[in-house]
Amino acid sequence: MPSVKSDLDILISALEKEKRELKKMIRQARSEYDNLIVYYHSEALLDLDRRLRVFYSFKDPYFEQKEDLKRRIKHWRRGDFMEKWSPQLRERMGKWNDEKVKELEMQLQQLIDLPAVQSYPQTHFIDEAFLALYEKRCRSFQLVMGEEDDLHLRLTFRIQKKTLTVTLKGISYEDEPDFIVEGRIPQPLKAAGFEYFEGQGKYKRTFAFAGAGDIPGVKKWLAKFIIEDSWFYWPGKKMTLKYK
């Protein structure tokens, strides 16, 4: 009996198919010297690659480290940078390159040989946070992304009279605490449904919330915002949940 693919695997397969189609369209546009189409498709490909890295990292926390090692192995193995060197120097450096490749390959194999990290399908900390909020076991909770850097994004969730309010604040630079650029709301935040309240200096998004049945819809919005619309989360970044 064939194994059933997880939702994550299905999503990755769909994005990989889209990636192949984009590459095909880029090749076609280049053959027709349509540089504008090449530019737009290349931008879309970069965004698609970013999302794929996030999804692959959900499956394998060592994904980024493995990919970095593969890139370095390819770099040292090809040795393109030595083409204009003298034969004697190329020979000497070639031996050094071989040793470097072996060292990197050993590091890669060590990561590959690590036991698979168990998935935790029963971990519902976001669900629990929403329930704690609805049942008034807390006043609010926050998701903070990128806190280890000077840059961070903070989402605060509160419920009042069956309305869930998500407030966004963030520190990009000390003199621009609210991402305000000439009073215009950034497009990703607008696309995510946020409105800017100038008097409060905050972005807000509301949802109807009458209980546990509304959690899946909010989680889908949150997942899309974190992975696609937020520029503060990528593989290896820290995300913290805090109760208030």
Image (spheres, grey):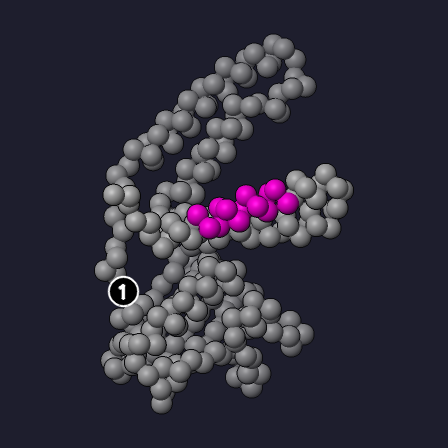
How many C-alpha atoms fall within 10 Å of the one at disc 1: few (<14), some, or many (≥20)?
few
Q: Determine the residue positioned at 44% across, 47% down.
A: 13
Where, quadrant-wise, is the N terminus in this rendering? Answer: top left
Q: Which residue is drawn at 52% across and 25% down?
A: 76
Task: Please determine whether, in this image, residue 52 is positioned above or below residue 27.
Answer: below
Dot 1 falls on a residue whose secondary structure is loop
Residue 163 highlighted magenta (yes or no): no
Determine if residue 168 is in view: yes
Location of the C terminus by quadrant is bottom left
Residue toward you, 5 or 132: 5
Q: Give the percent coordinates (x, y) of residue 238.
A: 39, 57
Q: Which residue is drawn at 48% across and 28% down?
A: 73
Q: In this view, does 130 lie to the left or right of 204?
A: left
- Residue 109, percent from left and from top: 35, 30
Instruction: Provide residue 116's location: percent of width, then percent of height.
Output: 27, 41
Quadrant in the picture for residue 161: bottom left
**Type of amino acid at the residue the image marks with label 1:** His
Residue at 56% x, 79% y: name it.
Answer: 196
Residue 216's x, y, as percent?
A: 35, 70
Magenta stretch in the rendered image: 13-25
Residue 177 appears in the picture as rendered: no
Say whether residue 15 is left or right of residue 60: right
Q: Where does label 1 land, which residue?
A: 124
